[in-house]
Amino acid sequence: MSEACDDSNVNSNDGCSDDCLAIETGWECLIEGSLCVPICGDGLLKGYETCDDHSKNSIGCNDTCDDVMIGFDCSASHPNLTTLCVPICGDLKKV
């Protein structure tokens, strides 16, 4: 049996499973032995991401998924841990 990833720990929910046999959904592990990083633009809210609107085109959430754009609300969570950014109504900004 070979490892699919190795992020230098035996913790789950950080990109690499606790047994190193699987890269977890919503993550990518680019460099063996280093921390895995969330996949920005996949619609899943993981790790340091504060928003992920299923796009990398800055429609409510910036292209690194760590900042909500002015005039948008990305706090509406869905059961599958996705967020959908929507314009804020009544804020005097047309976006």
Image (cartoon, rainbow, N blue to C red):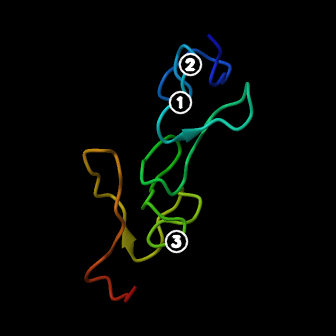
Identify the mark at residue 14; answer none if there is no mark: 1
> What residue is at 29 percent from the left and 52 percent from the top?
77
Q: Amino acid at mark 3?
A: Ser
Counting other residues with Cα less than 10 Å from the Cα at mark 2, is it few (<14), some (14-19), or many (20 or more)? some
Q: Quadrant of residue 15?
A: top right
Query: Label 2 sits on what residue type?
Result: Leu
Q: CA distance from mark 1 to mark 2?
A: 13 Å
Spatial CA distance of label 3 from label 2 is 34 Å
How far separated are the C-alphas under marks 1 and 3? 25 Å
Under tag 2, what secondary structure?
Answer: loop
Task: Please report whichever mark, 1 or 2, sits nearer to the chain's N-terminal start.
Answer: 1
Location of residue 95 with respect to 49 vertically, above or below:
below
Residue type of the residue flagged with mark 1: Asp
Name the residue that disc number 3 marks: 58
Residue position for label 2: 21
**The C terminus: image quadrant:** bottom left
**In the foreground, 87 or 32:** 32
Discs 3, 2 touching: Cβ within 8 Å = no
- Relative to 23, residue 37 above or below: below
